[in-house]
Image (spheres, rainbow, N blue to C red):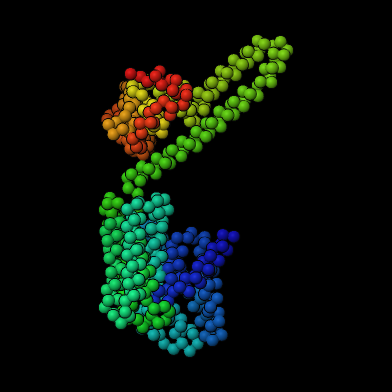
Amino acid sequence: MINIAAAFAYMAAYLCLREASNDQWYLPAGLRFATLLAMPYRLWPALFVGEVAALSTFRVRMAAEYGWLYYAASTVLAWPIVAVIVRQVRRATSLPTLSSATDAVALVVAGILSAELVSVANKAVSAYLRAGGGEMVYGDLIVYSLGHLQGILLAALGLPVVARCIAVRRLARPFAVESACAVLVCVALASAVYVASPDDVTALMALRLCMLLPSVALTFRHGWQGAAVSSIAANVALFATIPHQDAGQVDGPALLMQEAFAFVAASLFVLGARLHPVSVTMGSIVADAADERRLVREHLEAQERRQRDSALRAEALQRESRESMRPVLNLLRKHGQAEAAMNLVGMAHTQSSQFERQVIDSIYPLTLERFGFFAALESEAFVAHFGAVPFHLDLTGSPFTVAMETNLAAYRVLGEAIDHLASLDPTSVSVRIHCGRKADGRGAVSMAIRAIEPGVTGRSSSQRARLAQLRNRVAAYGGSVHTRGYRMRLIVLDEAPAPSAALEDVSLPSNVRLLREVATVH
């Protein structure tokens, strides 16, 4: 079913793009190149069937006039030529994901080769296999190859941008805003070309050349992503201002502009790939440090919400289990077995408390949510997590001045830090924690952790990986990790300063309000 759907979708897209094309701008060539570059190999037969079906809809009528050999060759020849080129490119590079300037060069060269070879093959078929074809006309070859190249560049330059957007799942705001401005500039210049007099060739060429200025600017601002988006916008604007269908072939200035645009677009794309490491630091489509931290933070918080839901479901099941014992207790009391009923109640209460402390809190620290950060650190689930490695807590400040999300992050960070130091086989771990507010109003949890008399020196690969994971989690909360020997100092911060109302008692759960003064350690 997937192959059938892919074939029909390709055929429909091919026919629609052909209607919007002309000989100087053949958009189906871009569709062919992009689908071969992006689609998995298992769908390639479906793409081939879709292209043959699309070409057959209008070329089958030519078979009676030009011969069936011409029909067959002109229908099936172009796709295998491009497939062979794209296959080699995909084996040698990481495309469609662009990872280096070499990938950009390979993409441009593959596009040029595809356009030239397909154009030559089509002209040769028309000249030698078509009935009454005569000889090849090399003058038209430039127009046809340029039309294929323009169509390929539209898709080939945009495909790595789409792949990058899918990978990072968002656009950096500066890139999005500046790209939108570039598109608006191209639209304005295209409108000016429409308004200008057709006889003023100099003015038309000047306006069309100005369409390239946003491409140059975005290339130096955002690397190959900026070059791709702005070049596509400029080429589409140029396409909208040239004559449609065969009349475009006699428009010399328009043909000259197309050649210039194709050369500039390909050159800027390669140049942008060379400049990409610099452009990333300046801010481009890749999310900047703040955006990356926000993405990681959102992912961690979503994960915590899922774990919280699991813990609440386990707690609800536990309550249902206790309620199911009520008929048994009533039956025992009715038959004079009050002592047995009391023993059963006591055993059920013990097991229930143990389940809550060791199982539910290991899924999600409900104790932290209900009684605060410091209470969660004293819970049986947190202590039991580290097995035989004892740790000593020195708690100061008040966790209620810090956002719940930050307290939860500090709880997870502390667990990972103790795990990391416990792998060094120390006799114990010393932990000092202070909760409070910084000068800018943000809540902060600072932690100093030290392994006492470690039995293992150096760090293994798993320990380095654990430490890298810890750094990523802390960085997501705008904090920092400092390590020195067998000591670690960490700080986790609120995302933004909390309003003064957030410190009012009414914003806290009732059980936490009652325990606030008790849980605050001076």
Q: Quadrant of the C terminus?
A: top left
Which residue is depicted at the point 33% across and 21% down?
Answer: 396
Which residue is depicted at the point 32% across and 45% down?
Answer: 289
Residue 158 appears anywhere in the view: yes
Which quadrant would residue 493 be assigned to in this image? Answer: top left
Which residue is depicted at the point 37% across and 20% down?
Answer: 520
Outermost residue toward the right in this view: 335
Which quadrant would residue 97 be assigned to in this image? Answer: bottom left
Answer above or below: position of 331 versus 95: above
Residue 308 in picture, x, y percent from top left: 50, 33
Residue 25 in picture, x, y percent from top left: 40, 74
Which residue is depicted at the point 35% across and 37% down?
Answer: 495
Residue 106 appears anywhere in the view: no
Q: Is residue 381 left or right of residue 431?
A: right
Q: Quadrant of the N terminus?
A: bottom right
Residue 400 in picture, x, y percent from top left: 39, 26
Front residue (pair 70, 330): 330
Residue 168 in picture, x, y percent from top left: 39, 50
